[in-house]
Image (tube, helix red, strand yellow):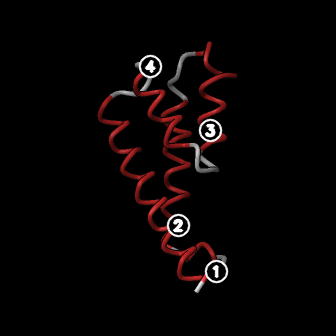
Amino acid sequence: MSRYERLHAWRECHELALAVYRVTKRFPDDERYGLTSQTRRAAFSSEVGYALRFAHEAGLLPDEEWSALNDGQARARFLTWQLYQALGR
C-alpha cells in the first residue's frame, strides 16, 4: 500500500470515484459520450458535485443514490480541504 493510500481523504475520494463509475453504468446509452463521460471525468476533479446534481435533476440518478453520492462527495471534499490546510501550515 502506498503512503497516500493510507490517508483517509484519499480513501474517501477513491470510494466516491468507484461509486460514480457504478451508478453511471446504468445511465442511458445515449448519454455515453455526454453525461456519463463527463461525470466519470469529474469524479477525478472538483466538478463531480455538479455533475451528480445534474444527473439527479435530469432524472438519471434516483434520490437515494444521489443522496449517498452527495454525502460521499461532501466528505471527500471536507477531508481533502483539511489535508490541504494541514500540509500548508
Q: From the viewer's perspective, is residue 74 above or below residue 25?
A: below
User: What residue is rendered at 53% in x and 31% in y?
Assistant: 24
Disc 4 target residue: 58
Foreground label between 3 and 1: 3
* x, y percent for residue 27: 52, 22
Which image quadrant: the C terminus? bottom right
Q: From the viewer's perspective, is residue 87 above or below residue 44?
A: below
> Helix or strand or loop: what does disc 1 sit on?
loop
> Helix or strand or loop: what does disc 3 sit on?
helix
For marks 2 and 3 on the same chain, the one whose residue lies earlier in the sequence: 3
Between 32 and 59, the one nearer to me in the picture: 59
Disc 2 target residue: 80
Disc 3 target residue: 40
Which image quadrant: the N terminus? bottom right
Please identify the residue farthest to the front as the structure is shown: 89
For marks 2 and 1 on the same chain, the one whose residue lies earlier in the sequence: 1
The amino acid pointed to by label 3 is: Arg
For marks 3 and 4 on the same chain, the one whose residue lies earlier in the sequence: 3
Instruction: Name which quarter of the figure residue 3 lies in.
Output: bottom right
For marks 2 and 4 on the same chain, the one whose residue lies earlier in the sequence: 4
Disc 1 target residue: 3
